Image (cartoon, rainbow, N blue to C red):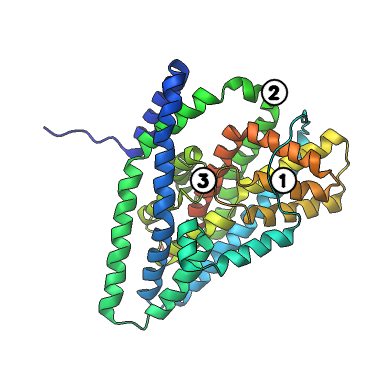
Amino acid sequence: MSNPKIGLVPQILIGVVLGACAGMLFPGVATQLGLLGELFVAMLKAVAPLLVMVLVMSAIANRHESGTDGRKVLLTLSLYAVGTTAAAVLALVMSEAFPQSIALSRAAEGTPPAAVTSVLRDVLFKLVDNPVNALLTGNFLGCLAWAVLLGIGFRRASEGFRRNLQTLADAVSAIVRYVIRFAPVGIFGLVSFTVATVGIEALAAYASLAALLVVTMLLMALVVNPLIVFAVTRRNPYPTVLRCLEESGITAFFTRSSAANIPVNLALAKKLSISEELYAVTIPIGATVNMAGAAITISVLALAAANTLGIAVSPANAVLLCVVSALGAAGASGVPSGSLLLVPLACSLLGIPHETAMQVVAVGFIISVVQDSFETALNSSTDVVYTWAADQVGRTG
């Protein structure tokens, strides 16, 4: 007798429903079940840096000579920049059309960067990090930099050594597949804990702000991204866009970490028959710098603060805000709510006091159960969408 096989996405949806029920009916038990979610995210974060390093090393060491490879990587990075900037502009338009006000009464802890230069400085120092420390701390830019350099060096190694590198990459990829199988159980734990600890009441006061963020991100995912992809490929983008939202976005929605979703995206890129030499480089980079959702969060919250305080935003400041939001978003860490501590950077451009800006951050944390989930789903799924678009250039059929 054969057993019908349920796909991963239906399993995850079942986990979501069961987790929500557990959180509502048995909140005491559900808070303990949160351990399952923490364990799942920890496993993804543990394997992701090693996967990035060995996969990129192997891909470069064993890559076939092709002049199009480098151009497609550059095209993908350009799409990342265009998409993140477009998201900031979209956030500005939506904020002007539907202005928001915030009841400011709380303070938030944290040490946000004081200028864009400090964000860029952090990125540069991550690139030159010690490789062992990069692996231990989950510094994906450092892992990627060392993987590229070592991969180039290993191109001169013997064929047997390069085959061993590929064997190592395949072994780590197999471990990733085992971890991803745990996704339904992990997401069940995450949903149980969230429903049990964060009630609807906490979100009600900021429902309008959360709704604006969600609608803007959906417009980016379902309208702007497809337009950008169509402009590059001249093909119907929606089958790939929707598949990426389904297979990458759903997982990212619950893990709320672009870094933790790297293994999921690498597996999805392989399913989409994207060149491994392309996605092995662009997916890890995207988890760090392709942050359309973060750009939307930064811009919307900063403009809501300005509207609350009655500060008029001039056209010049609006353009500057879009640029800084895009740059700041690229420096946002790939962890839950990583973009929120960059909000004060944008607020400073509009003359908003630091103390007020940190209260806005506190509001962001209150709605983060919604905002950060949609943000990460948009960020992570877009990594694969843009990589796919770049890979289609020059292909026939």
From the image, tell me which residue sits under label 3.
Answer: 257
* Percent of width and height locating residue 44: 41, 48
Residue at x-position 70% and y-position 49%: 112
Q: Residue furthest left?
A: 1
Residue at x-position 27% and y-position 71%: 164
Q: Nearer the viewer, residue 18 or 224?
A: 18
- Residue 235 lies, with reference to residue 352, above or below; the image says below
Left or right placement of residue 254 versus residue 212 in this view: left
Q: Secondary structure at mark 1?
A: helix
Q: Nearer the viewer, residue 124 or 293?
A: 124
Q: CA distance from mark 2 to mark 3?
A: 26 Å
Of mark 1 and mark 2, the one earlier in the sequence is 2
Q: Secondary structure at mark 2?
A: loop
- Residue 249 lies, with reference to residue 69, above or below; the image says above
From the image, tell me which residue sits under label 1.
Answer: 343
Q: Nearer the viewer, residue 37 or 167?
A: 37
Q: Where residue 205 is drawn, which disc sits there?
A: 2
* Percent of width and height locating residue 107: 74, 35
Q: Secondary structure at mark 3?
A: loop
Left or right placement of residue 378 versus residue 158 in this view: right
